[in-house]
């Protein structure tokens, strides 16, 4: 069920997951925080690969599981991709991801965080995307918390796209 702060999408193929990311990459603004949830293999990194493509990033985007963060400054706006899977909340706190989403140590961009439940302090404003496997593909449940500047445009665009397919 969708309302003004949420949207549910069916993503029948891997290409649909990539396309969702591409569309978000074209629509999201600097300062947007994405919290990506889902089981291992649910498509979080695939979505980020699409996001990078939508931002115009040409570097290969891979999961930063061992590097913890990958920075992609060359797109329309920078992308900061965190993977917190292997960290405790205390270790995440010491990493200071808020410095990225506040633009304190790097230019303001999109901060995408896989495994956000490990954050010791959740940001005030963010777009949450929960990916889940279903029999034929996956679902994406998008919802906002607080104020996400471009949410109305994102929701309108994704709703129009999902009714067109």
Image: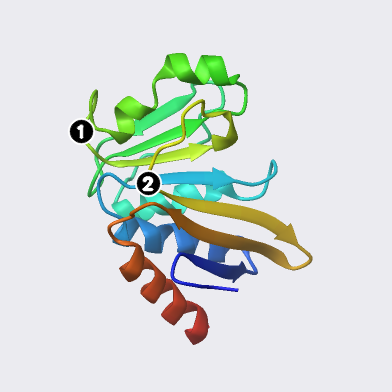
From the top left corner, tell me how far across and down residue 65 is, in percent.
56, 27
- Residue 84 versus residue 160 in the image, above or below: above
Name the one closer to the observer, 35 or 52.
35
Residue 133, by quadrant, is: bottom right
Secondary structure state at the residue bearing disc 2: loop
Q: What's the residue at 52%, 68% (across, down)?
A: 7
Q: Residues within 10 Å of mark 2 (few under 14, many from 20)?
A: some
Residue 107 numbered tag: 1
- Residue 132 versus residue 37 in the image, above or below: below
State which mark lies toward you, 1 or 2. Answer: 2
Q: What's the residue at 33%, 45% (across, down)?
A: 58
Task: Name the quarter where the N terminus is drawn.
Answer: bottom right
Q: Residue furthest right?
A: 135
Q: How is the image coloured?
A: rainbow
Q: Is residue 115 visible?
A: no
Secondary structure state at the residue bearing disc 1: loop
Which residue is denoted by mark 2 in the rendering? Answer: 125
From the top left corner, tell me how far across and down residue 38 is, in percent.
65, 47
Q: What's the residue at 47%, 18% (across, down)?
A: 93
From the top left corner, tell me how far across and down residue 146 is, in percent.
38, 51
From the top left corner, tell me how far across and down residue 134 is, in percent.
75, 63
């Amino acid at each position: 069920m969708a309302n003004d702060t949420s949207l549910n999408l069916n993503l029948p193929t891997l290409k649909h997951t990539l396309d969702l990311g591409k569309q978000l990459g074209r629509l999201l603004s600097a300062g947007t925080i994405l919290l990506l949830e889902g089981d291992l293999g649910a498509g979080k990194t695939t979505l980020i690969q699409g996001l990078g493509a939508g931002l115009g990033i040409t570097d290969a985007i891979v999961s930063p599981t061992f590097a913890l963060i990958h920075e992609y400054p060359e797109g329309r706006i920078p992308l900061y991709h965190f993977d917190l899977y292997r960290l405790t909340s205390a270790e995440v706190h010491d990493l200071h991801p808020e410095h990225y989403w506040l633009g304190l140590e790097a230019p303001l961009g999109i901060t995408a965080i896989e495994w956000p439940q490990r954050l010791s302090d959740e940001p005030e404003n963010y777009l949450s995307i929960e990916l889940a496997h279903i029999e034929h593909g996956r679902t994406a449940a998008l919802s906002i918390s607080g104020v996400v500047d471009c949410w109305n445009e994102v929701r309108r665009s994704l709703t129009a796209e999902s009714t067109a397919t």
